[in-house]
Image: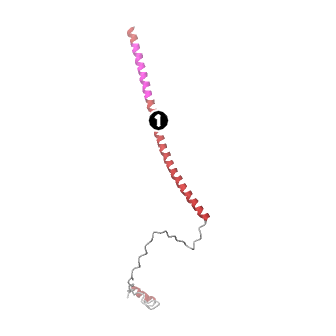
Amino acid sequence: MSFFKTFRSRSGSNDGLDSEGKDVDAVDTTTPPPPTNPPPPPPPVLNENITVTVEDEPDEDPVRAQLEKDVRQRDSNISALEKVRNEKKQDIVNLEMELEKERLQQMKEALTHKIESERIKRQTTHTEERLKALEADMQDKAA
């Protein structure tokens, strides 16, 4: 006797029988009947337009149809405008990058020009000092 049968018999059940008097713990050993002939294949589909109408559906409301058409048109317009906006946004980003590069290049050129002009001023000052020193030496020798 299995644990469950023991438990049922102790708990005052119907000794493992259901309401019809069949053994609850019995395993159904009957097998389903073998399948009969397979269903026939579907008929071939002809290349003609088939329209299906459902009689339960109400006729299409022309106002609603026009509104749906308008909404679809607006959606397609919005999608197109969004695509153009994204392209323009990317163009702006590219132009800003190009502007920043150009700005940096101009700053670099301005700094280079300033450094060169300072160098030339120093050379000029140094050359003038040497020239004055040479003139003074020549005047001393001439005197």
Q: Position of residue 60 (x, y in %)?
A: 59, 67
Residue at 46% over, 40% down: 101
Question: Which residue reaches farthest right?
Answer: 63
Please say if 126 is above or below 84. Answer: above
Please say if 120 is above or below 49. Answer: above
Q: Position of residue 2 (x, y in %)?
A: 38, 86
Residue at 44% over, 35% down: 108
* Chosen colour scheme: secondary structure
Nearer-the-camera pick, 132 or 108? 108
Question: Which residue reaches farthest top?
Answer: 143
- Dividing the picture into quadrants, the one containing residue 117 is top left
Question: Which residue reaches farthest bottom?
Answer: 21
Secondary structure mostly seen in the magenta stretch: helix
Nearer-the-camera pick, 27 or 87? 87
Range drawn in magenta: 116-137
Q: Is residue 133 located in the magenta-colored stretch of the structure?
A: yes
Q: Is residue 96 located in the magenta-colored stretch of the structure?
A: no
Residue at 46% over, 38% down: 102
Nearer-the-camera pick, 92 or 35? 35
Q: Position of residue 96 (x, y in %)?
A: 49, 43
Q: Tell me which amino acid carries mark 1.
A: Gln
Residues packed near mark 1 inside 10 Å, few (<14), some (14 to 19) or many (20 plus): few
Please say if 95 is above or below 54. Answer: above
Question: Split into 4 quadrants, where in the image is the C terminus?
Answer: top left
Give the residue at mark 1. 106
Q: How many marks?
A: 1
Q: Position of residue 98 (x, y in %)?
A: 47, 41
Is label 1 in a helix, a strand or a loop?
helix
- Dividing the picture into quadrants, the one containing residue 131 is top left
- Dividing the picture into quadrants, the one containing residue 35 is bottom left
Question: Split into 4 quadrants, where in the image is the N terminus?
Answer: bottom left
Residue at 42% over, 27% down: 119
